Each structure stands twice: as structure tokens, then as C-alpha cells.
Amino acid sequence: MASGRIHSYETLGGLDGPGLRTVIFLQGCPLRCGYCHNPDTWATDGGTDTTVPEAMARIRRYRPYYGKEGGVTLSGGEPLWQASFVAELCAACAAEGIHTALDTAGRPLSLPVEQALVACDLVILDIKHADPRKFRQLTGADWRGMCDVLAFTKARRKPTWIRQVIVPGWNDRPEDIQALAALVADHPSRERVELLPYHGLGRGKWEALGEVSPFAKVPAMAGEDLAGLQRLLAQALVR
């Protein structure tokens, strides 16, 4: 039985999947996104080593507030960095009728990654940028993992939410939004495509690690500007 390293749990999460959820932040991430609000999850040797039964015992405590729509979301860090653990935990949740969502930026396909993607009920795919060059500039990695997961969810018709964080001056041009739409428009089982506003709430964590975010001086994304881009995205998706 696989074990995994868990950074932390969040209860009553209302943003990371349908309904109210337990959000489990897994430790370890190969990306170094400039606006990351959880840089303390990057290190692979952090967190607490946890077995699937131990995680399930914690999940059961919170089950009463899930209702008909809620459940568990596996986030991070990058949960597919620990794909075997994720697959087993999602299967254990499924055996007890608990909905699972996998919040990921993607990983190159392998048997454990495919098993994790199949085992979860919903994939929430964070597309860092629709341009491979800017994707690398932002994350320090290429976008193969994101493309692999996007293609897999398309082929398997996996229920998918697409998300992208919008940073002023970085990916808030109309052409950036249209490129995102072109990338996901043919997804046969996408349930939503949403833009999330950049904020600087993780700056304190960067400072605590002795790091400085490259977006430290970038202002938060204005709500009215984001709403306009979301309308543009909706229009591009129906063309």
C-alpha cells in the first residue's frame, strides 16, 4: 500500500470543486511558478508521511458536511508527483461513495499518473499559459505534463474544470485569452473554464523561505478586468 507526504488539510473548502470539500495539500512540486501561493509545498521531503488508511480516517471525520455535492480535493504542491498514493486514496474514497477531485498542473503520462486520473471523479487542470515559451518562463518546466493530462482527459471524456490564473501584464491580453480558448474548446467533457485573479497572498511564504517572487510588485488582478476577460473567454469558446 502506498503512502504519501501530506503538507496540510483544509476543511470546508468551497472553491476547489463542487460543494463543500476537504482539500488535501500534498507535498512536493517540480514547478516553480512565479506566483505560487504555496511555495512551502515545493520540497519533496517536507510534510508528514501518511498512509491511505490514516488519510481516510481524517476524511471520514469531515464527511458529514460534504452533502450530495461535496467531497475531497487533492491539491498541492503537485498531487501527481505522488500519483500512486493519489490513485489509492481516490479508490478508497470511491469505495465509500466520496467524490474526489484532482487539482493538478499536469505530469507526463505514466501508469501511476493514468491510474490516478482514472480513479478520481473530476480533474481540475491548471493551465499556466497557453504559450509553451511563456509556460516555461513562468514555471521553469516545459508543458508536456499539462498537454499530456489535457489530451488524456479529452480522450477519456473525463469531467474536467479548466483554470488559469490571470496576472496583470503577463497573460491578460485578449490574444492570451483566445489562445486558452483555442486550446480547450474541443474538450468534450469540460464542465467549466474559469479565470482566477492573481493575488499576492503568498508573498509572506516566499519571504519566509528567503525567496522573492518575480511578481512581488505586481498588483492584484482587478475584479472588473477579470470579469471582462471571462466574458471574452465565454465568447471565444462558443465560436
Image (cartoon, rainbow, N blue to C red):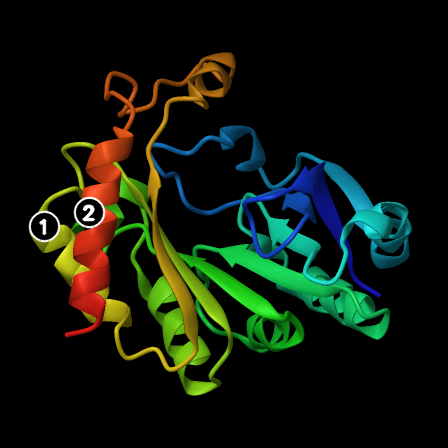
Q: Position of residue 232 (x, y in %)?
A: 16, 55
Could you say which disc has been placed on residue 216 in the image? Answer: none
Q: Is residue 132 visible?
A: no
**What percent of the width, then of the height, locates residue 77?**
55, 43
Q: Residues within 10 Å of mark 2 (few under 14, many from 20)?
A: many
Q: Tell me the SS state at disc 1.
A: helix
Are dots 2 and 1 in contact, CB under 8 Å? yes
Name the residue rendered at 28%, 70% in the picture: 184
User: Which residue is depicted at the point 91% across and 50% down?
Assistant: 57
Does residue 30 appear to the left or right of 57 in the view shown?
left
- At a point 45% along the width and 20% down the height, the residue shown is 206
In the picture, the disc for residue 229 is: 2
> Mark 2 or mark 1, which is nearer to you?
2
Residue 174: which numbered mark, if any? 1
Place of residue 39 in the rendered image (x, y in percent of width and height, measured from the top left): 49, 30
Q: Quadrant of residue 119?
A: bottom right
Look at label 1 and name its amino acid: Pro
Dot 2 falls on a residue whose secondary structure is helix
Q: Is residue 225 visible?
A: yes
Between the residue at mark 2 and the residue at mark 1, the CA separation in whole angstroms equals: 7 Å
Within-10-Å neighbours for mark 1: few <14, some 14–19, many 20+ = few
The number of discs equals 2
